[in-house]
Amino acid sequence: MSVEKIGDIQSNIFPMEGSIDFSFDLPIPIMQSKAKPTTILNVIPVNNRFLILKNYFIDFIKNFEIGEFESWKIKVKHKNDYYDDYSLFVLSFPLQKEIIDFEKSKFYKGKFTDQSFLGEDIIIKDYENYLTVQNKFQNSDDDFLKFKLLSLDFSKIEVDMFRIWNFPFGGYYVSERLKNSIEEKRFTGFAFQEIEEMDKRIKVIY
């Protein structure tokens, strides 16, 4: 799916967490002519901070524990017409700080130009330390932070939907309860995968 207008969606004006308390130019996605108006739309130019959802689905997930969120009604173009029942959606507060067990995770220096490169190990004590290390790597053209083991502790949270941001495998995740309910209601456009199946280096505590 492409966009008729990208708006501000790819800019760096948005805060890492918290409410978006200012106006911005909204995107206008374009559906392919043979595409169907699914409950969730996969729009490649829209980064994984945001989701594009049917308004009725946003009403549906209000019945679950999802934390603070914001949404903005948008138009979606299909052929020569526009759907007006979609919204741009974001969970205001990502939870990587709460769920990543840095003491059990293992990080090291990698290189963009050599994916097999194993640099020195980097000890990261907590999320604030992680951000400091990441900022240092941003000044490098080739070096970046990689992980050998990523430990996620879901026992620390009691939510049905959360977001990870500024970290590998960033995006949206749902509980088994919400996943089952989505499938029972036959909402369309969703694909689910267990986190540990995404990468064998990820270990999850439930």
Image (cartoon, rainbow, N blue to C red):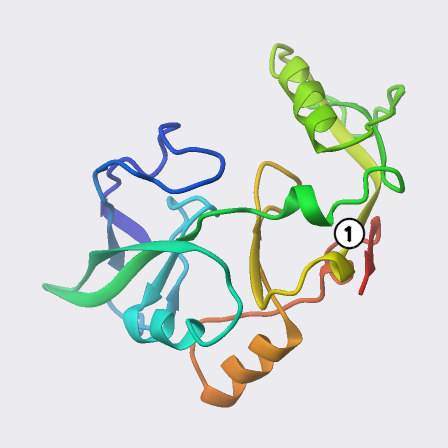
Which quarter of the rendered picture does the C terminus lie within? bottom right
Amino acid marked by disc 1 = Leu
Q: Identify the residue at image location x=53%, y=68%.
A: 65
Rendered location of residue 125, percent (x, y):
82, 29
Position of residue 132 in the picture relative to residue 32 (left or right): right
Left/right placement of residue 55 relative to residue 200 reads: left
Residue sitting at 76 percent across and 23 percent down? 114
| Residue 130: x %, y % from top left | 72, 27
* Tag 1 secondary structure: strand
Which residue is denoted by mark 1 in the rendering? 152
Question: Please, which residue is most extreme toward the left here?
Answer: 80
Foreground residue among 24 and 75: 24
Q: Residue 79: which quarter of the image?
A: bottom left
Q: Residue at x 68, y 19 (%)?
A: 132
Image position of 97 (left or right of 161): right
Q: In which quarter of the image is residue 14?
A: top left
Q: Is residue 135 visible?
A: yes
Hey, which quadrant is residue 191 in on the image?
bottom right
Residue drawn at 38 percent across, 44 percent down: 45
Position of 113 with respect to 36 (left or right) is right
Q: Mark 1, residues whose alpha carbon is within 10 Å: few (<14), some, or many (≥20)?
A: many
Instruction: Give 30 or 90, whichever is nearer the viewer.
Output: 90
Q: Which residue lies furthest to the bottom in this view?
A: 184
Which percent across, then down, holds residue 194?
A: 71, 66
Q: Which of 101 and 3 is in front in this view?
A: 101
In the depicted view, which residue is nearer to us: 168 or 43?
168
Q: How many numbered circles are shown?
A: 1
Whether residue 39 appears in this view of the structure is: no
Q: Measured from the top left, where is residue 1 in percent x and y?
A: 34, 56
